[in-house]
Structure formats: structure tokens, C-alpha cells
Amino acid sequence: MNMPKISVIIPLLNKGPYIKRALDSVFAQNFKGFEVIVIDGGSMDDGPDIVKKYGDNRIKFMRQGGKGVSAARNHAVNACSSDLIAFLDADDEWLPKHLGTIIELREKFPQAGAYTTAYKIKERNGNLRWAKYRSIPPSPWEGLIPNYFRSAALGEFPVWTSAACIPKNVFMEMGGFVEDAWWGEDADLWGKIALTYPIAFSWEWGAIYHWDSEGRACGRPSLEVEPFVTTANNAIKRGLVPENQLSDVKEYVARKEIYRAACNLSVGDNKNAYSILQRIDTKFFPIRINLLVIVSKFPAVFSKIVIRYLLDF
């Protein structure tokens, strides 16, 4: 087998109902020069058996139990044969042109630290919609995202893990996915890359994010600071954020902290939510801050009604 140009990493943990859909979407790619590394974190369902039934020598099946998705991805990267790493969650899927588009972006923009196609979101009600992209030139544009942090602050993630690809050397330079956090590890990696490198984007529809409410952070008590908030604040203190990005990085951090405050409100931790809100400095979201402060004065049963709207931005 020729050396693959792209290594596809799929973490697996009790995703038996979905892994076939994910793998089928990989093998349906127009671009065929890839390997697939499925790393299982201790599945108790039939997911591993489904993977093994493929019998394709491009699949490497590995096990790493109980250490979390970040550790699994990091471990899999070390086993990759190529210098370009693509990620796909086991419950998501690709469109046939995804990897081919990534290769084209790589050839056109070798200076980029990450590459991504556009994605759509499959909601719980079955609706399929575009991600809410902001501050990105309209389709059919492709190129280096003009302002990653403004785009991320004003819309949904311009880079999402199952639609993205990273040069292996950049992944290693960034230290991979942070392993000591249970949420926000993806956004932390993309943010670290965006602080250092441009990111290449194509409007080619490459992936579908199958949204699952069980994976959302809200619902856990006393939500802690997201990793990139710490990363960004440290970078700002050390003078590592370029002046032309500084205000947008701060607004992106503000948005993440607003979300954290809202999540704390949704589980009844109004005191902690209010404390978070008092520390947020933003020019983009003052109305949301004021609304959340008002909500923090009421019982959580009332706050949940307002939170549903406030989190949708």
C-alpha cells in the first residue's frame, strides 16, 4: 500500500448505532489516499465488531480504555503514517468531496495551520441547516479566514473538528488536545492554531454534524472555565496576541464566559453565574450580559425559559 496522504482518526466509545455511517462516508470519498485509525475507548456495545467486519487494510483498530476522547485522539496521532491528520467523530459523517477539498486547500495554502470544509448541522428535530458562519466571505469563496476570532465570536465555530484537518507538525507544536478538561478541548486547539497560523476554509459542503443534546456541557453543575479562556488570557498577558486580533480574541473569550454563566444559571447556580457575569468585558454582547444578570436574580425554573434563547447565538 502506498503511503497515505491523510490519516483519518475516529474515536469510538459506545457509538455502535453510528460508526457504520461514519466509516461508509470515509470510504465513499472521491479521494482514496487515506488510512483510517479507529481508536476505541472501552466500548460496551457492538461498535468494535462493526469496525472489524470491514476487513479493509486501510483501517487500523486500536484500544485505549478510559482516558477520554482527547487522550484517544492524541494517542492515535502518534500511530499515523501521514503528515496530514483529519478527524471524524463516530456519530458524524462526511460528504464525498471532503478529503479531496482538503487536499486542494493544502496545495493552495501550504502556510495554513489547519484546513476545513463547510459543515451543516443535523438537529434533534431532523432539520439539516448550515452552520451559522459570520465574517467569512460568501460562497463560493475559499481562502484564509480573514478573522477567525471575530467569526467564532459572532457565529458558530468556523472550524469544527469533524470537518477539519491539521498538519501533523502543527498538531505536535500545539501539544495536541488538552487531556485534563472534559469540555472545550476542541475549541482550545483551534484557538491555539488561530493565534499562530492562518486557517484555510472552503465553502464546499464537506461534513454533517449530528447534534446530540447529551454531549452538551449545560446540565453539569458549576461549569468550570473552558480551556481556551485560560489559553487566551495567558497569551494576552504575555503579549502574544497580535494587536489587530486583540479585541476579537477578547470578544471570543467573552462569548465563552457568557455561555458558561448561562449554563450555570440553567442548573440553578445563580450565585456563580452572577460572579462570572460581573467579570466579563464585552462590546459585542452587553444586552445579553444585562439580561443574564436580571435572570440571575430569579429561580432557575424561570431562568431556563430565557436561557433557551440566550444560548442560541
Image (cartoon, rainbow, N blue to C red):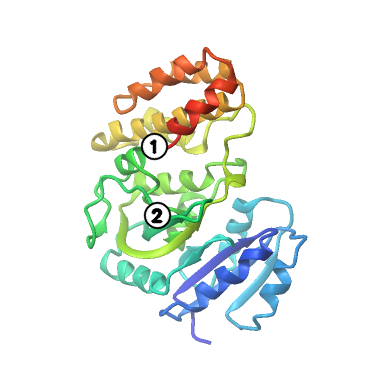
* Residue shown at the point (59%, 46%) measured from the top left: 215
* Crowding near the residue tagged with mark 2, few <14, some 14–19, many ≥20 C-alpha atoms within 10 Å: few
Residue ranking furthest to the bottom: 1
Label 1: state its secondary structure. Answer: loop
265 left or right, relative to 195: right
* Residue shown at the point (50%, 56%) measured from the top left: 126
Image coordinates of residue 100 in percent, x first then y, are: 37, 74
Residue ranking furthest to the top: 297
* Crowding near the residue tagged with mark 1, few <14, some 14–19, many ≥20 C-alpha atoms within 10 Å: few
Residue 284 vertical position relative to residue 6 in the rendered view, above or below: above
Mark number displayed over residue 106: none
* Residue shown at the point (43%, 60%) measured from the top left: 163
Instruction: Look at discs 2 and 1 and give the one toward the viewer.
Output: 2
Whether tag 2 and tag 1 are in contact, CB under 8 A, the answer is: no
Q: Which residue is mark 1?
A: 313
* Alpha carbon distance from label 2 to label 1: 15 Å
256 left or right, relative to 285: right
Query: Relative to the observer, which residue lies in front, 96 or 169?
Result: 96
Q: Which residue is mark 2?
A: 129
